[in-house]
Amino acid sequence: MNERERAFERKRNIINAMCATAEHNGKPSDWYTIRSLANRLHRLETTLSRLAEDECNYPIYDEAKQKRIEKLAERLVRENLGCNVYTQRDPRGYCIRMYLVDEDGRKWFNTWDGETTGLAW
């Protein structure tokens, strides 16, 4: 399996866990809708990561924009998946972390904390 196939597999697994979480919480779990949500969250996460890096490296950065994006990401996840989410400002990790479950209702994670899922693809 090459790197492109592994990236596709990671993305598919995360979207499947997002669908299972939405279904578990009584939210609509259409795969294509969740995929577009995941893509949007990934773009927001990339922006947050860049802003977090700017916060570490430069004395002046756009904190208002960072807070606005964090609130948007939290709202999108809570409304569409019904799960908890938190954002962090450390550029070394995932800036958006979600608490997802699998089809059996068990925790599904891809981070070292054993609790959360970050968007990685």
Image: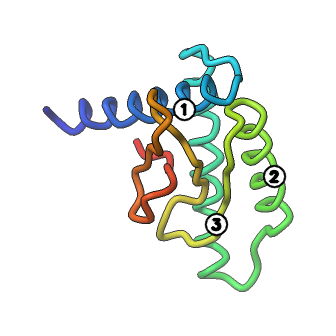
Rendered position, 92 above or below 71? below
Quadrant position of residue 5? top left
Quadrant of the image for the C terminus? top left
Q: Is residue 33 above or below residue 14?
A: above
Q: Amino acid at mark 1?
A: Met
Between label 2 and label 1, give the one nearer the viewer.
1
**Residue 36 in which image quadrant:** top right
Q: CA distance from mark 3 to mark 1?
A: 20 Å
The answer to whether residue 116 is above or below residue 52 is: above
For disc 2, the marked residue is 71
The quarter of the displayed image where residue 40 is located: top right
Q: Earlier in the sequence, mark 3 or mark 1?
A: 1
Name the one closer to the observer, 9 or 117. Answer: 117
Question: Callout 2: helix, strand or loop?
Answer: helix
Instruction: Tell me the tag on residue 18.
Output: 1
> Disc 3 marks which residue?
88
